[in-house]
Image (cartoon, rainbow, N blue to C red):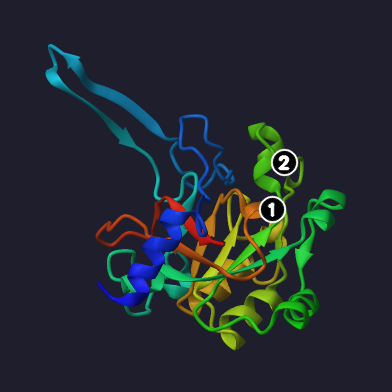
Amino acid sequence: MSLVLATLLEELTAGRLRVVDLTQPLTPQTPLLPLPSQWNNTPAFKIWELSRYDERGPAWYWNGFETGEHTGTHFDAPVHWVSGKDLPDNTVDRIPPKKFVGPACVIDISSDVARNPDFLLTPERIRHWEEQHGLIPAGAWVLLRTDWSKRTDPKEYINLKENGSHTPGLAKESSALLAEERDVLGVGVETVGTDAGQAATFDPPFPNHYLMHGSGKFGLASLSNLDQLPPTGAIVIAAPLKIVGGSGSPLRVIAITP
């Protein structure tokens, strides 16, 4: 075993490093991204029992389940959006696995979001964060802390009004900055999708999806516990299921942090 891996195990065992679960529970009540009725919506998570130490299987318990690729805490691959449909290695089964692991840069806008649920992260705010914590490195996961995951009521989590959902996100200029100038792995958010709730009205519509995936970058949605991570210094591991041709996948996201 290499010295680096041995040290990692020693630090974890000694409790000097923690493993933080950034994943929301996946149940039939998991909130879903609402799309207009003319488009197919993702199916809710469904689970059913196959056997539980009974006549259906005397020594084992297991379940069947079905859901959409973008339900709950999930991974968005480049092929998920039209802008990334022709890129190489754009499906979850073809992405090199080393790209699932990267340093975390956590940008905290929770106080702004508490005052304005439609708050957007601007490039100026990113550069202010970099003045304090250093330049966002290439290959980083940029995680947007909003504390939105603390909204345990599904209605408050989706925050749907007459003119659509109202949730925070990134200004399109910020997505362009992170994807093109900082060359990040992708962005992660606590909301149901990586774009703001009103992003259907932006130009282009859903600009974070369009710019990130068009640049071959990824998305992580419905994260939690970002308040347990420091601004820098944590490592995020976000590995989707290896679905052949898949546009995304529910997944268990973890962070290793001091």
Q: Position of residue 22 (x, y in %)?
A: 53, 51
Q: Is residue 90 visible?
A: no
Amino acid at dot 1: Gly
Decide if residue 105 is on the left or right side of residue 2.
right
Q: Position of residue 111 (x, y in %)?
A: 83, 55
Tell me: residue 177, above or below residue 11. Answer: below
Decide if residue 156 is on the left or right side of residue 20.
right
Q: Position of residue 247 (x, y in %)?
A: 38, 60
Q: Are marks 1 and 2 in contact (CB under 8 Å)?
A: yes
Label 1 sits on residue:
197
Decide if residue 12 is on the left or right side of residue 117.
left
Residue drawn at the location 69% of the way across and 73% of the way down: 172
Tag 2's secondary structure?
A: loop
Tell me: residue 232, above or below residue 115. Answer: below
Q: Quadrant of residue 143?
A: bottom right
Amino acid at dot 2: Asn
